[in-house]
């Protein structure tokens, strides 16, 4: 008998304790989970808006309008910028701008006074409360560093729908003086309503300014909750307590939404009904007591069945706990489901945020256009030059071979110009799957890229007193399908980057090989290398480590071109040791088509005997044409040594010599020539003429220094001047 | 303060001339030249000319009051505020009401000059070096702040004046206003919107007045 009583009592106590602890634990987990998801969703939402606000605060027009307090221009420009974000803006309520819709925006001046929007549809213009509730926000303007988030209520009602989250963004002028701020309000994300395992509704709300914004709660209860939360906050107690409301006993959780805000603090409040759990506890208690009584009576009636009587309750208790366990599992399942949905919403919002940022970046392309225009102008120069030459010089036009040569150069320059335009197109051009490429020889492209970039890695480096060597290791001569000019551009870009990455000089190696089905090109440098974050971001458009010197477009273009060629780009980099770019392109099967170069022969008209000394064949070519057109006789030399040999063999009237040459520099060559014939005029060509002017160190042996690029006119005038002087 | 202001009145040349001809000269204390550090803007294209130090400091000195002398003819040639090295050059000009101002672009990049200032609102749109934007006539007196929509660091001031007697100081702050009428007027020095210095002056025919305008 005593045993039975003890067992019943102990069971009763343990069951109740277990039930209560489990319930408390599960509710706490549920609340924490909900708040976490709520905050994450809220953060994703507001960070997209904050990003937009930051961009807006940089707008020159908004700054200019705010500076002169021109309210009309201010709101008009802001409306144009906010198109697609502001609610009630029917033109842009398309599907691509989901979730984040601002309900209103206002500007405040540097004193924090709201500038009324007048007739501009800045959202909620009829609401007098907007003005009232925003005013305190403006007043804390000076305490805000750059941006701050706060909450306001638009009406005296207590529904959460009247709440708005407000982002305050300071607007400064170029010197950093505060001009005012932009306030942008948008609806508060509502917490996903959930239910307890017993089906009773959980209540969610927001506590702001000693007001509780919550659905379906009577005034007395609301007042009580407000008081209790305020008290709990000032006591800084744990995040939950029990409260006895008119509608029953509830477990209340609360958590600050913006712990660092300069504005009135806001709290998320969650109420879980305890009535159901109390009911459950009571039922269980009665069950166990009744059960104990039955057992007692049974004990009195027949001690023979004592053993059976004992085994029965044990069975039932086991069954009860099994039932409890299933319920808990089910509740956990529900919780997981809610969580999954919230996570989904979160990832969608993050995608939207990415889109907004992407759009901002694209708008910067507009600014790039002026850069492209400049490049375009540069390529137009030779076009104009050769066209001019042909039109001006009838004899040249009549000579078919020479004219053809000029036209070919004209064409090359025009093609280059097309490439400049195409560069812009690379940004938006999608990958066409059916694009057919001609067959190209990679080894040839590698060689071309090296010679094209020679001015950069050889001459510029030499001028800076550096040595950059470029080596090739063409283990295989792979054939791929691709656009020659684009693949060349990939390599020239990589070579440029390699040179820039080696401020102390170094070596660049280009290797080609075949790996299974793919052609591989490696561009290796011995430069500074990249840290991991740079390596990860280096392909992004407008990401540059070159400061003013870089557009941040080179590598993103490389990436774009390789994408179109179905190629892969791998970057290996070690800080202090260098970087290797590995390009993998699918191999093609056919053989490349060879283009035979056009052969031409010079015509001769004699007037002056000119010797041109330049290591760059293209410059020799262009100068020869220039001079021959004017009726001079031209001989060329690729080096100082060759020039001296030619000079010893026969007399010349004029020598044109390049400044930067391997082995023997232009200066040395000029000095030797003057030793042989003191009266011969010497023109020196240089890409660094400006430098010479500044330092005043014109080489002694030289009569005139001419800057590259050289026009026919300048050359002609210089020659005239020199000969007249002589 | 007073000790800083030295007023020297030269001995008046005897005999009344047909045309009043007074002169004021002196020194305006200018703020320290602003050392502008070139800001690396990642989105800026690189073909632009390198950023240079800001314009040398200068002020506009002008005489206000009721002038009885006949109106001086207005200049027919437009004033100029160019855009050079991504800055307005000069970044402060003074013009008389009714004067036209040109805004030519000397840079290789686009510019878009506009203003929201009360005396003159205008927007020239985007233009390049070889394009000539419209000329703007400033027909109301006041301070006009001009901006470039593309380059947020660019800022220029145009002081539109009713008086025909004004001059921009040199970079050391010296000025000399000549051929002024005689009488009581107000001399003002405009450094920027927040710093306009005022001194009452009395001009005598044929005399040269020395007035310095120190800072606060």
Image (cartoon, coloured by chain):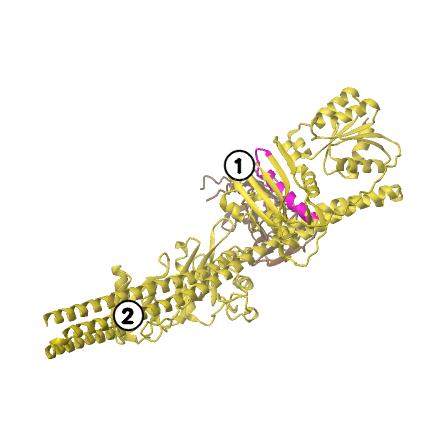
The residue where tag 1 is placed is A577
> Would you say residue A123 sits in the magenta stretch?
no
Residue A694 against residue A94 in the figure, above or below: above
Q: What is the magenta range?
A: A484-506
Assign a secondary structure to mark 1.
loop
Labels in figure, total: 2
Q: Position of residue A659 (x, y in %)?
A: 71, 30
- Which chain does brown denote in the image? B
Q: State which tag comes first along the sequence, 2 or 1.
A: 2
Q: What colour denotes chain A?
A: yellow
Residue contact between numbered discs 2 and 1, judged by CB atoms under 8 Å: no
Of all residues, the one furthest to the bottom in this rendering is A301
Q: Quadrant of the N terminus of chain A?
A: bottom left
**Which x, y percent locates residue A481?**
69, 51
The prevailing secondary structure element of the residues shown in magenta is helix
Q: How far across and down, in percent of the image, does residue B27 sit?
A: 53, 40
Check residue A491 for magenta coloring: yes
Q: Which one is closest to the eye, mark 2 or mark 1?
A: 2
Pointer 2 indicates a residue of which chain? A
């Amino acid at each position: 008998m005593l045993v039975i009583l003890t067992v019943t009592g102990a069971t009763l106590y343990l069951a109740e304790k277990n039930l209560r602890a489990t319930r408390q634990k599960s509710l706490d987990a549920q609340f924490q989970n909900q708040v976490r998801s709520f905050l994450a969703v809220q953060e994703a939402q507001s960070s997209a808006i904050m990003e937009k606000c930051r961009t807006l605060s940089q707008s020159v027009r908004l700054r200019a309008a705010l500076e002169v307090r021109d309210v009309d221009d201010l709101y008009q420009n802001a409306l144009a910028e906010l198109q697609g974000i502001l609610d009630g803006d029917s033109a842009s309520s398309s599907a691509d701008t989901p979730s984040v819709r601002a309900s209103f925006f206002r500007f405040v001046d540097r004193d924090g006074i709201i500038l009324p929007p007048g007739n501009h549809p800045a959202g909620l213009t009829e609401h007098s409360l907007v003005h009232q509730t925003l005013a305190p926000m403006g007043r804390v303007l000076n305490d805000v560093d750059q941006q701050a988030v706060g909450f306001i209520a638009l009406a005296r009602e207590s529904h959460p729908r009247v709440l708005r989250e407000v982002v305050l963004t300071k607007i400064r002028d170029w010197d950093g003086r505060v001009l005012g701020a932009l306030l942008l309000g948008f609806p508060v994300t509502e917490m996903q309503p959930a239910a307890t395992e017993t089906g009773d509704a959980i209540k969610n709300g927001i506590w702001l300014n000693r007001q509780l914004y919550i659905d379906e709660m009577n005034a007395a209860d609301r007042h009580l909750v407000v008081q209790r939360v305020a008290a709990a906050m000032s006591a800084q107690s744990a995040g939950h307590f029990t409260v006895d409301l008119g509608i029953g006993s509830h477990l209340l959780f609360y958590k600050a939404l913006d712990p660092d805000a300069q504005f009135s603090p806001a709290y998320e409040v969650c109420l879980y009904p305890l009535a159901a759990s109390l009911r459950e506890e009571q039922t269980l208690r009665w069950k166990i007591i009744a059960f104990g009584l039955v057992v007692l009576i049974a004990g009195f009636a027949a001690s023979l069945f004592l053993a059976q009587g004992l085994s029965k309750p044990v069975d039932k208790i086991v069954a009860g706990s099994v039932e409890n366990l299933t319920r808990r599992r089910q509740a956990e399942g529900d919780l997981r489901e809610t969580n999954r949905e919230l996570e989904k919403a979160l990832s969608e919002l993050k995608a939207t945020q990415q889109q907004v940022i992407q759009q901002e970046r694209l708008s910067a392309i507009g600014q790039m256009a002026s850069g492209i225009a400049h490049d375009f102008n540069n390529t137009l120069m030779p076009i104009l030059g050769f066209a001019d030459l042909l039109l001006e010089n009838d004899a040249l036009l009549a000579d078919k071979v020479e004219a053809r040569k000029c036209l070919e150069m004209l064409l090359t320059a025009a093609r280059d110009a097309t490439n400049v335009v195409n560069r812009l197109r690379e940004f938006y051009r999608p990958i066409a799957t059916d694009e057919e490429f001609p067959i190209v020889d990679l080894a040839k492209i590698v060689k071309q890229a090296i010679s094209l970039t020679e001015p950069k890695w050889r001459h510029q480096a030499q001028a800076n007193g550096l040595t950059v060597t470029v080596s090739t290791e063409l283990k295989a001569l792979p054939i791929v399908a691709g656009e020659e000019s684009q693949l060349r551009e990939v390599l020239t870009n990589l070579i440029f980057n390699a040179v820039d990455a080696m401020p102390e000089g170094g070596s660049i190696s280009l290797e080609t090989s075949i790996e299974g089905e793919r052609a591989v090109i490696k561009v290796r440098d011995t430069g500074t290398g990249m840290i991991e974050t740079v390596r990860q971001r280096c392909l992004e458009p407008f990401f540059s480590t070159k400061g003013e010197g870089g557009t941040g477009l080179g590598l993103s273009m490389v990436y774009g071109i390789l994408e179109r060629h179905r190629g892969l780009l791998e970057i290996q980099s070690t800080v202090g040791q260098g970087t290797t770019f590995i390009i993998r392109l699918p191999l093609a099967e056919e053989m490349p088509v060879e283009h035979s170069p056009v052969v031409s022969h010079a015509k001769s008209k004699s007037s002056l005997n000119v010797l041109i000394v330049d290591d760059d064949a293209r410059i020799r070519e262009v100068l020869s044409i220039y001079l021959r057109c004017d009726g001079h006789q031209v001989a060329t030399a690729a080096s100082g040594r060759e020039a001296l040999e030619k000079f010893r063999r026969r007399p010349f009237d004029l020598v044109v010599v390049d400044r930067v040459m391997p082995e023997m520099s232009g200066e040395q060559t000029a000095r030797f020539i003057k030793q042989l014939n003191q009266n011969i005029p010497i023109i020196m060509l240089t890409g660094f003429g400006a430098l010479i002017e500044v330092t005043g160190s014109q080489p002694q042996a030289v009569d005139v220094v001419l800057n590259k690029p050289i026009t026919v006119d300048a050359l002609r005038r210089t020659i005239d001047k020199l000969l007249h002087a002589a | 303060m007073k000790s800083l202001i030295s007023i020297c009145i030269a001995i008046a040349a005897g005999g009344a001339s047909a045309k009043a001809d007074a002169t004021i000269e002196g020194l305006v204390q200018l703020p320290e030249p602003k050392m502008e550090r070139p800001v690396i803007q990642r989105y800026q294209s690189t073909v632009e000319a390198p950023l240079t130090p800001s314009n040398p400091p200068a002020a506009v000195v002008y005489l206000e009051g009721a002038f009885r002398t006949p109106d001086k003819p207005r200049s027919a040639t437009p004033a100029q505020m160019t855009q050079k090295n991504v800055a307005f050059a000069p970044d402060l000009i003074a013009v008389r009401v009714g004067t036209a101002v040109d805004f030519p672009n000397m840079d290789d990049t686009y510019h878009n000059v506009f203003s929201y200032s009360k005396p003159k609102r205008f927007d020239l749109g985007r233009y390049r070096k070889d394009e000539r934007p419209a000329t703007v006539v400033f027909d109301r007196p006041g301070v006009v702040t001009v901006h470039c929509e593309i380059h947020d660091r660019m800022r220029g001031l145009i002081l539109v004046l009713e008086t025909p007697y004004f001059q921009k100081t040199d970079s050391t702050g010296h000025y000399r206003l000549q051929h002024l009428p005689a009488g009581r007027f107000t001399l003002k020095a405009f450094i920027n919107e927040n710093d306009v210095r005022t001194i009452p002056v009395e001009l005598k025919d044929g005399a040269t007045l020395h007035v310095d305008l120190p800072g606060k």
